[in-house]
């Protein structure tokens, strides 16, 4: 049995810092600002020969506002899933009414709970313990998460009754699929629709998602990990430091994923920022699926206009499948994962060298490379040089003079003949050394003499 540990508490008490300490990562954004975490964030930690799952949650403020209520539901779900609850409080704030409300919530859950007093640097231990023993819980530990003080002893205590467990049993999470887009285009709603539950906070307000949230799920016996990301705005509109961190994390999610789903708002059409995001995806070489969301809200004339615009402006990513969907109502969402599977398979394809060379000869036969200073660029053979994206290495003579237009022809030819869907293809050109080059240079020097 792999224990599940949920971190709960008021905003800004250090839950995300402790999450990063337990998972030895920087997956959760940490800053001196309350309310950064809004969704359940899962991570895997190891201590000696034991593996555990830790859940970071949003801060419980006790407010009855819509967004706070949604965050509280996420925390409630984390408590239901957990085997152990770490109720984190702030030694510098002392015992607050908010802590008492959370204590009542934990008692109703009826699960094992440890009160974790964080930020104890410089505090009187006896005074701190006296304050928080008033909550009525048996287990109380003093730590400083930012300085890793007391965290190892805490983990040992939590895990002592659990058997050893291999991390490999937890880490088989399938393809990593990053869901990206501008703010408020429906990324979180789409993820909730795909997994069939309110897994991440979806709210009609730009900037609801601030961190990248990994969401493992299973579909038709296959494992996937969806990554919900913060909406990326134009650089000139990003002013808060937290939003800058969120954008960086979103771009990092593209790099660590194998497939990217770009969500576009059909009601606003394709924007310059959507094209900028596409540029990031292409530069990273990731497989791509495009989801045009909120399609149900358009009338027939608008749909024709949007289709025409997309066809005209997305010609440079013709390899990517496009889906017209409604994340809110589920229309067309099921087909997305079919395209994700195809894109993943194409990105990791293995291609035989003999077959690649045959295809190269076929491409050259149909359309010869152009001349350079009266001499034909010769392409001799090809082999695979990488995956995700597929890299095709072509050897020949004077390949450095092969025009970009002809390279694009070769890329499109390989994509078509290899029946690749959803992934770009990169070409590397290598020229063999001319064995007569030194002799020719010697002849030229002799002529000058």
Image (tube, rainbow, N blue to C red):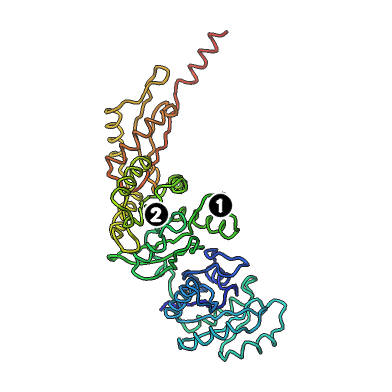
Crowding near the residue tagged with mark 2, few <14, some 14–19, many ≥20 C-alpha atoms within 10 Å: many
Q: Are marks 1 and 2 in contact (CB under 8 Å)?
A: no
Q: How far is the residue under mark 1 from the one under mark 2?
A: 20 Å
Crowding near the residue tagged with mark 1, few <14, some 14–19, many ≥20 C-alpha atoms within 10 Å: few
SS at mark 1? helix
Quarter residue 430 falls in: top left
Residue, x 70% and y 87% (percent of image)? 127
**In the shown orientation, is residue 306 left or right of residue 244?**
left
Q: Which residue is mark 1?
A: 237
Q: Earlier in the sequence, mark 1 or mark 2?
A: 1
Q: Does 404 sit above or below residue 56?
A: above
Q: Position of residue 427 (x, y in %)?
A: 40, 38
**In the shown orientation, is residue 109 left or right of residue 115?**
left
Q: Nearer the viewer, residue 422 or 290?
A: 290
Disc sitting over residue 263 in the figure: 2
SS at mark 2? strand
**In the shown orientation, is residue 230 left or right of residue 291?**
right
**Quadrant where the C terminus lies?**
top right
């Amino acid at each position: 049995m792999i224990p599940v540990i949920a971190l709960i508490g008021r905003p800004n008490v250090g839950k995300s810092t402790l999450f990063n300490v337990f998972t030895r990562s920087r997956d959760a954004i940490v800053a001196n600002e309350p309310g950064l975490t809004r969704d359940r964030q899962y991570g895997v930690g190891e201590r000696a020969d034991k593996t555990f799952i830790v859940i970071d949650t949003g801060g419980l403020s006790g407010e009855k506002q819509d967004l706070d209520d949604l965050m509280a539901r996420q925390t409630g779900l984390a408590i239901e899933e957990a085997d152990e609850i770490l109720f984190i409080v702030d030694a510098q704030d002392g015992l607050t009414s908010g802590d008492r409300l959370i204590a009542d919530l934990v008692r109703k859950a009826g699960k094992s709970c440890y009160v974790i007093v964080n930020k104890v640097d410089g505090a009187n231990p006896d005074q701190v313990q006296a304050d928080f023993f008033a909550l009525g819980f048996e287990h109380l530990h003093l730590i400083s998460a930012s300085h890793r003080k007391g965290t190892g002893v805490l983990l040992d205590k939590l895990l002592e009754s659990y058997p050893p467990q291999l991390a490999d049993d937890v880490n088989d999470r399938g393809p990593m699929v990053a869901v990206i887009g501008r703010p408020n285009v429906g990324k979180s709603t789409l993820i909730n629709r795909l997994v069939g539950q309110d897994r991440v906070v979806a709210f009609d307000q730009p900037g609801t998602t601030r961190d990248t949230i990994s969401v493992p799920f299973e579909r038709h016996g296959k494992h996937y990990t969806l990554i919900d990301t913060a909406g990326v705005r134009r650089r000139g509109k990003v002013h808060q430091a937290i939003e800058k961190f969120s954008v960086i994390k979103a771009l990092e999610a593209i790099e660590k994923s194998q497939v990217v789903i770009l969500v576009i708002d059909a009601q606003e059409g394709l924007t310059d920022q959507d094209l900028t995001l596409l540029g990031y995806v292409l530069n990273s070489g990731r497989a791509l699926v495009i989801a045009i969301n909120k399609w149900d809200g358009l009338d027939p004339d608008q749909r024709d206009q949007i289709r025409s615009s997309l066809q005209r402006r997305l010609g440079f990513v013709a390899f990517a499948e496009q889906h017209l969907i409604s994340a809110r109502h589920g229309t067309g969402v099921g087909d997305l994962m079919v395209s994700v599977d195809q894109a993943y398979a194409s990105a990791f394809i293995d291609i035989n060298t003999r077959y690649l060379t045959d295809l190269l000869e076929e491409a050259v036969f149909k359309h010869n490379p152009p001349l350079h200073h009266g001499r034909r660029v010769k392409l001799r053979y090809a082999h695979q040089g990488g995956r995700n994206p597929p890299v095709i290495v072509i050897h020949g003579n004077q390949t450095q003079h092969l025009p970009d237009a002809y390279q694009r022809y070769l890329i499109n030819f390989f994509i078509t003949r290899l029946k690749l869907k959803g992934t770009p293809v990169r070409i590397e050109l290598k020229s063999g050394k001319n064995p007569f080059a030194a002799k020719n240079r010697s002849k030229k020097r002799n002529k000058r003499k």
